Image (spheres, rainbow, N blue to C red):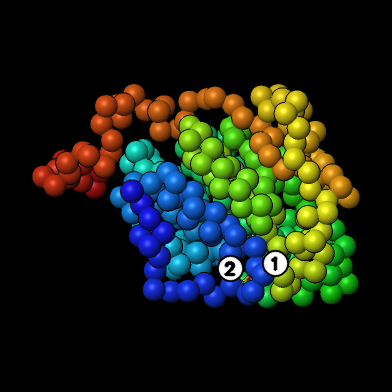
Amino acid sequence: MTTMADLQTPNMPTWCPGCGNFPIWVSFKNAAVSQDWNNRNTSIVAGIGCHGHLVNFTKMTAIEGLHGRPLPVASGLKLANPSLNVFVFTGDGDCFGEGGNHFIHSARRNHNLTVILHDNGLYALTTGQTSPLTQHNVKTKSTPNGNPDFPLNPLVMAISAGATFVARCYASDMAQLQEMMIKANNHQGFAIIDILQPCVTFNKILTHQFYQENTYYLPETHNKNDKIEALKKAYEFGEKSIPLGIFYEEQKTPFEKEFQHLENQDLIKIDVTNRSLEKTFEKYY
Ligand code: SF4
């Protein structure tokens, strides 16, 4: 069984005290211990941002890719080795700025991945510029007179693009977050958890206090199989009205199961050591 010590690297986290990345990291490790996720059966792929440092503090097979590109890297990993649990850690700037196009098409294809969105409402690593999720009129380093742009809604984007498991958690609600990470990983298809992650240094609006005062759990009566109801809930965001929980869930064939020739043989198990490419080169050159 995986233990906490198995997941520990010699590096200690360098995030600012109070940062929402801490409880996300701990929740993931708690989930890993409870589900026996480890170096042999799980890979993590991170983008660029404060969240990406998680790969340095978590002893698990990991890739920290180019800015905005964790999804294509993770899609390739899962396609080659479908038995792996593949987690994508990404920030709101990474995922919806540089990586926006990848997000749409990964969700549309229902790649069998779990996306952990560290949603702090700005680019934190580069010291607080607006991201595509920054609220309108908010003053940041890059918009000292207020953000002239209107934000994307990550849940609406996910549901509309075709994601088949769409949820939201608050970073410091570690019990719900740990449970949601397990559910999202068990889901067969594209799963995203939008995690409200306070950046205590640069975001003075979306604070721990703000989320503690204004979030609520979706009731049992919420029909998570109804896309229209899910979209209505996804549009809710304001005073006392930020829902947490599973907004939408659908059973649908994941991308890697669409390839009949891979049904009984994972790409990673195909022996390529003695393949000659001579005939292919002759044909095309
Ligand atoms: Fe966390 Fe913000 Fe500090 Fe980055 S800058 S470590 S997101 S509090």
Front residue of this view, candidates 125 and 170: 170
Amino acid at dot 2: Cys
Task: From the viewer's perspective, tell me whether residue 53 is left or right of residue 96.
Answer: left
Front residue of this view, candidates 116 and 10: 10
Cβ of mark 2 under 8 Å from ligand 1: the answer is: yes
Say which residue appears at 26% left-offset and 42% top-offset. Answer: 268
Task: From the viewer's perspective, tell me whether residue 228 is left or right of residue 58.
Answer: right
Give the quadrant of residue 275.
top left
Say which residue appears at 56% left-offset and 43% top-offset. Answer: 179
The image shows residue 261, relative to residue 118, as above or below, that is above
Mark 1 sits on what residue? 199
Residue 211: give x, y in percent of width and height. Answer: 78, 55
Residue 195: give x, y in percent of width and height. Answer: 65, 52
Marks 2 and 1 close (CB-CB < 8 Å) = yes
Cβ of mark 1 under 8 Å from ligand 1: the answer is: yes
Residue 124: give x, y in percent of width and height. Answer: 66, 69
Q: Quadrant of ligand 1?
A: bottom right
**In front: mark 2 or mark 1?**
1
Q: In the structure shown, which secondary structural element does the residue marked by tag 2 occupy?
A: helix
Amino acid at dot 1: Cys
Q: In the structure shown, which secondary structural element does the residue marked by tag 1 occupy?
A: loop
Mark 2 and mark 1: span between their CA atoms? 10 Å
Front residue of this view, candidates 264 and 149: 264
Neighbor class of circle 2 (other Cα within 10 Å; few <14, some 14-19, many 20+) is many
Mark 2 sits on what residue? 50
**How many marks do you count on the picture?**
2
Residue 159: give x, y in percent of width and height. Answer: 67, 35
Task: From the viewer's perspective, tell me whether residue 166 is left or right of residue 58.
Answer: right
Say which residue appears at 78% left-offset and 55% top-offset. Answer: 212
Say which residue appears at 74% left-offset and 49% top-offset. Answer: 152
